[in-house]
Amino acid sequence: MKTGRYGFMAAAVLAVLTFQAGPGAHEARAQGAAAVPAAYAQRGDLNETQALGRQVFAQSCGICHLQPSLGVKTYGPVLNRDAAAGNDEVMRAFIVNGSDRMPGFKYYLKPAEINAIIAYLRTVPVPAAPAPDAPKQGEAR
């Protein structure tokens, strides 16, 4: 397996994705980093660019932006079509240049891969807000 800074991130993403249990877990292990959590997977309507974006997102961004299991917080925000206020250029700037908490990927990702990530994220629906009277995870009713 590739070593180094980004190789470690890819290995960590693969480990997180492989660890997920439940129906289809053995398929996730077989598919490696291309398999993503249920909220992002099973999108048969993705075009080729969006499918590449899903794969690159899982490999390069998932370690911080994908929730490894229920109840576990992510390091970075969970991303969807409303990320960066829906503005592709703002999202591109974040991916390329990074921020105080996020590294820039201008030397790691090709422009086509960045465009693919953006195209994929524009297909990810905004999660539904929890009901105001719903108990929080871990609370008894």
Image: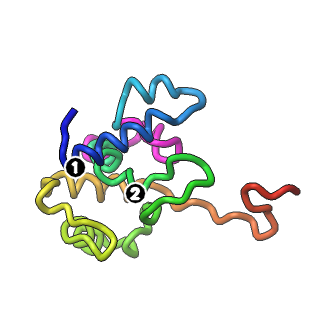
Q: Secondary structure at mark 2?
A: helix
Crowdedness of circle 1 by 10 Å Cα count: few (<14), some, many (20+)? few
Q: Residue at x 49, y 42 (%)?
A: 37
| Residue 49 appears in the picture as rendered | yes
Identify the amino acid type marked 1.
Tyr
Which residue lies most toward the right here? 141
The answer to whether 42 is drawn above or below residue 80 in the figure is above
Q: Considering the image in quadrants, where does the C terminus appear? A: bottom right
**Dot 1 corresponds to which residue?**
6
- Marking on residue 102: none
Mark 2, Cα crowd under 10 Å, few <14 / some 14-19 / many 20+, is some
Distance Cα–Cα, label 1 vs label 2: 13 Å
Please give the residue where the numbered disc 2 appears in the rendered image.
Answer: 64
**Amino acid type, label 2:** Cys
User: Residue at point 34% right, 37% down?
Assistant: 33
Residue 31 placement (x, y as % from top left) = 37, 28
Task: Please name whichever residue, 115 or 8, is drawn nearer the observer in this view of the structure.
Answer: 8
On whether residue 97 falls in the magenta region, the answer is no
- Give the left or right position of residue 129, taking residue 110 as reference: right
Prevailing secondary structure of the magenta residues: loop
Magenta-highlighted residues: 34-50
Residue at the image position 40 percent from the left and 75 percent from the top: 85
Counting from the top left corner in percent of width and height, residue 115 is at 22, 57
Q: Earlier in the sequence, mark 1 or mark 2?
A: 1
- The quarter of the picture where the N terminus appears is top left
